[in-house]
Amino acid sequence: MSAETPPSSGPGRTEDLFELAAEHEQVVFANDPATGLKAIVAIHSTALGPALGGTRFYPYASTSDALQDVLNLSRGMSYKAALAGLDLGGGKAVIIGDPRTLKSEALLRAYGRFVQSLNGRYYTACDVGTFSVDMDDIARECDYVTGRTVAHGGAGDSSVLTAFGVFQGMRAAAERVWGSPTLAGRTVGVAGVGKVGRHLVRHLIEDGAAVVVTDVHAPSVEAIREEFPQVTSVDSTDALVASELDVYAPCALGGAITDEVVDVLSAKIVCGAANNQLAHPGVEKALEDRGILYAPDYCVNAGGLIQVADELEGFSFERAQQRAEGIFETTRQVFELAAAEGIAPAIAADRLAERRMREVGRLRGIWLDH
């Protein structure tokens, strides 16, 4: 078992990696051929505290795709933690492979030993392809794990408060656009009704919204329709985007908001749980030009991070939920700054997060005699 740097495949390869990770403090490649483990841990920033972020287990087409994803996601976690007011930095990990065939106790425990070797610079948690029971296996070899099962004193499924936070952000967006913080009487399109999307649909139905859903996984749609017969479904994200909507909520993988989506979207608000929703820089301007209010993803989807971070203090669901309720006010502040400075909400959110990283992070440079 060994930590390794990727092999050089010619001149300039190493420089390219440093260029790609120019913003990051540390990127670690972990390899254990016996279990099939190939993992990358990216630590973006520890200015506010140890880096916290989930482990994504996903069959990436290539190592470079996995690297790009973990770099983007870890950067997003720094901003998410900063904007959520947490004393945590940003990190993320990816395990390359299909979790349905590759995941095993041995692989997860091997991965746990690698995370342990970072000595608390990085705390892991659940993400796409990993669950609380997996965190329990990782924790058998590692002290720096959160998002564990309730049986092990953990917060359990972090999608509960992720959805709650997205709903709070959506209420703040509704207040900005329609003058009242409710989705009652509005039509909300939810793309992706897995863990987070399912809970979000429940909040929307309880608030009196009409909900349209889609998911590549047909059983997820069937489960939603069974629980909420009033929910309608469409066959594809393209069909959902082209529907008559008031709010579009991307809750699957990133890159959902492309130029093509912006062109056909009838919704006045984009607010969802997916990370890195904007397909490329400049999409936020296209949304603004079309009069569509974008609630920045890492601002509204921080509820899961708040939930697993609370576990580090000895988990209290009530305390975590109270903190996640603050996403309403944070989203409001983002919209207010955007309006005051004439900038897109995505840029306003970045400025607020960067300001906190700079101002509070600076204090870490004040030497204390222990």
Image (cartoon, rainbow, N blue to C red):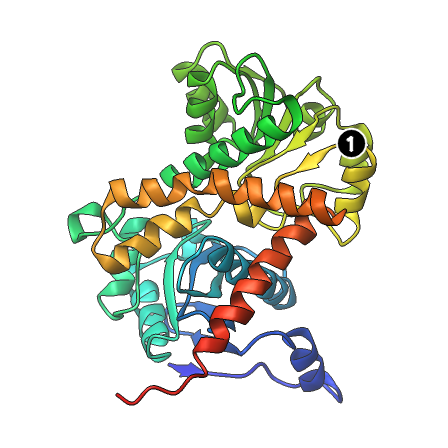
Q: Quadrant of the N terminus?
A: bottom left
Give 133 or 356, whichever is nearer the viewer. 356
User: Viewed as shown, does residue 264 lie left or right of 233?
Assistant: right
Q: Residues within 10 Å of mark 1 (few under 14, many from 20)?
A: few
Extreme residue toward the front, this view: 340
Examine the rendering and report whether any part of residue 274 can be seen. Answer: no
Q: Is residue 257 above or below residue 197?
A: below
**Residue carrying label 1:** 291
Secondary structure state at the residue bearing disc 1: loop
Locate residue 338, reporting x and y percent: 69, 46
Examine the rendering and report whether any part of residue 145 can be seen. Answer: yes
Q: Is residue 326 above or below residue 269?
A: below
Count of numbered badges drawn on the protein: 1
User: Viewed as shown, does residue 305 lie left or right of 67?
Assistant: left
| Residue plotted at (25% across, 64% down) | 139
Locate residue 304, reporting x and y percent: 40, 47
Q: Is residue 317 above or below residue 9?
A: above
Give 296 or 107, whichever is nearer the viewer. 296
Locate residue 298, reporting x and y percent: 55, 49
Extreme residue toward the top, this view: 230
User: Viewed as shown, does residue 35 lie left or right of 15?
Assistant: left
Q: Is residue 138 above or below residue 169?
A: below
Residue type at mark 1: give it: Gly
| Residue plotted at (26% across, 88% down) | 370
Locate residue 285, reporting x and y percent: 80, 45
| Residue plotted at (43% across, 78% down) | 364
